Image (cartoon, rainbow, N blue to C red):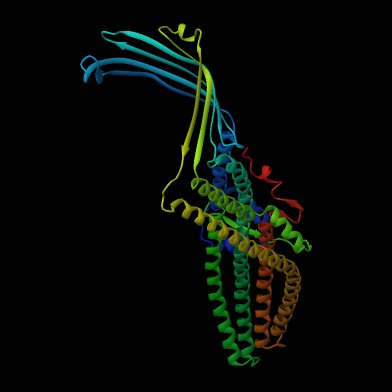
Amino acid sequence: MNIRKIFFIVICAAFTVSARAQVVELSLSQSIEMAIDSSLQSFISENMYLSSYWQYRTFKAGRLPSLTLNATPLQYYRDFTKRYDSQQNIDIYRQQQSLYSYGNLSLKQNLDVTGGTFYIDSELGYVQNFGDNDYTQFTSVPVRIGYSQSLFGFNSFKWEKRIEPLKYEKAKKQLLYSHEQISETVINYFFNLAMAQAQYDMAVDNAASADTLYNIGQQRFKIAGISQSDLMTLKLDAINARNTLKNAEISLKRNMFAFVSYLNMDKDTLIQLTLPNKPQEFVIDAAHALELAKENNPDYLQYRQDVLESEREVERTKRSSLFDASFSASVGFNQVANTFNQAYQNPIQQDVVSIGLSVPIVDWGVRKGKANMARNNLNMTKLSAQQKEISLEQNIMLTVNDFNIQQDLIASAEEAIELATMAYNATRQRFITGQSDISSLTLSLDRYKNAQTNYISALKNYWLSYYNLRRLTLYDFERQKSLSLMFDKMFHAE
């Protein structure tokens, strides 16, 4: 069924809007595109994606070498400080006036495999004392190469390498998933408005038809063609039709405002909907849809992420309950001189090796308790993920079955509306000519109204099922393309 063009002239007159009201004709696909482009819900989902995107960029940057300058350009002291007087064997306070300056340039690289840090750096220091013992010194480390890491501790770099790419992949799919959620919301608004427009259209026709039939009934009553009871029934139908028209107008305004607001359009915009044609018939295989969902649905990635994060916590608590050892070693050159040039002449070798130990002795079972809690949480996470996965698979199977049935329902609803329209027109004509009674006319009108609303409901249910399936699988079944492959075209972030 197509809503007639003349209907929109009537609705524009019914709406007491200002002269600046804009009339926009929208199809279902245009409405979806507009919502994904301009709705507030779309802006929220895109900003959530950008947050994950920059988090991933930060992770990638952490895997690259970093160059850092640490410096204290100027530090001046003028105070009394405690000194030891060896001649008197006592501590005394003496005035000190000093000027310090320090700089370190370091190049670092984190290693995911070992969890350690490799670095190359260079240092330069300067000190000048004022007073009775006025002197100046420079200290330099022209180059130093070093490496440090925890030998038995928790390797956060290794887990970040496993989790962060998964989180970013989930964020990309979640953006597509959110777009499909927006599409489903638009479908609800679209067909709610279409239903309101159709009911308003029927109410206009019904009010005009009821007035006409009441006038005809008055003429037939004068010649004893119908009873007074039938005449009163026709009058009551005319009154009810006018009341129905008013209620339909209120409902239409509410649905129009809700749809316009969701699309983030001007509040005075009037929308004329173009109902989609009968969709292309195709059958979706449930096993294929389930396979696509496991490949594309972000919920499956979320389940994997939850398990990985729980496993990470298990290892973290396990490592913390054991003794730890840290190792640090560096090889370089350094020199001290009274002038800047001499500080870089004939430097001597500088070797530093350090081993640290941390051994828990008595903690009253705190570390062990945390490790057991982490293992229990991991088991709960795995069971929860398995249960959610089963529930999601059932939802996919039911949605596929529902979609395949909806195609048959649309065909039946389309046939029903054709039959109901012909039956109502024929009954109405027979009533006008006196060949049918008021009960037959009322029954025929009810069937006509039901057929129209059932057709719109069938269209709505079909498209909701289809886009629900698209959301669960992130797959366009009409074009036979994965929405994940279309990501770069839909949203350019990199």
Q: How many labels does the image show?
A: 0
Picture layout, residue 170 above or below residue 222: above
Q: Which residue is drawn at 52% across and 46% down?
A: 319
Where residue 204 sits: x, y (%)? 60, 71
Can residue 279 be seen at all in this image of the molecule? Answer: no
Where residue 407 sits: x, y (%)? 75, 67
Picture layout, residue 102 above or below residue 177: above
Picture layout, residue 439 above or below residue 162: below
Q: Nearer the viewer, residue 485 or 372?
A: 372
Picture layout, residue 328 above or below residue 274: above
Q: Which of 434 and 121 is in front in this view?
A: 121
Q: Residue at x 57, y 59 (%)?
A: 379
Whether residue 397 sits left or right of residue 74 in the image: it is right
Q: Quadrant of residue 434?
A: bottom right
Q: Which residue is drawn at 69% across and 60% down?
A: 469
Whether residue 196 sits left or right of residue 469 in the image: it is left
Where residue 63 sits: x, y (%)? 59, 34
Where residue 306 sits: x, y (%)? 58, 53
Can residue 191 be seen at all in this image of the molecule? Answer: yes
Q: Which residue is drawn at 52% across and 64% down?
A: 254
Q: Which of 190 and 307 is in front in this view?
A: 307
The quadrant in which the C terminus is found is top right
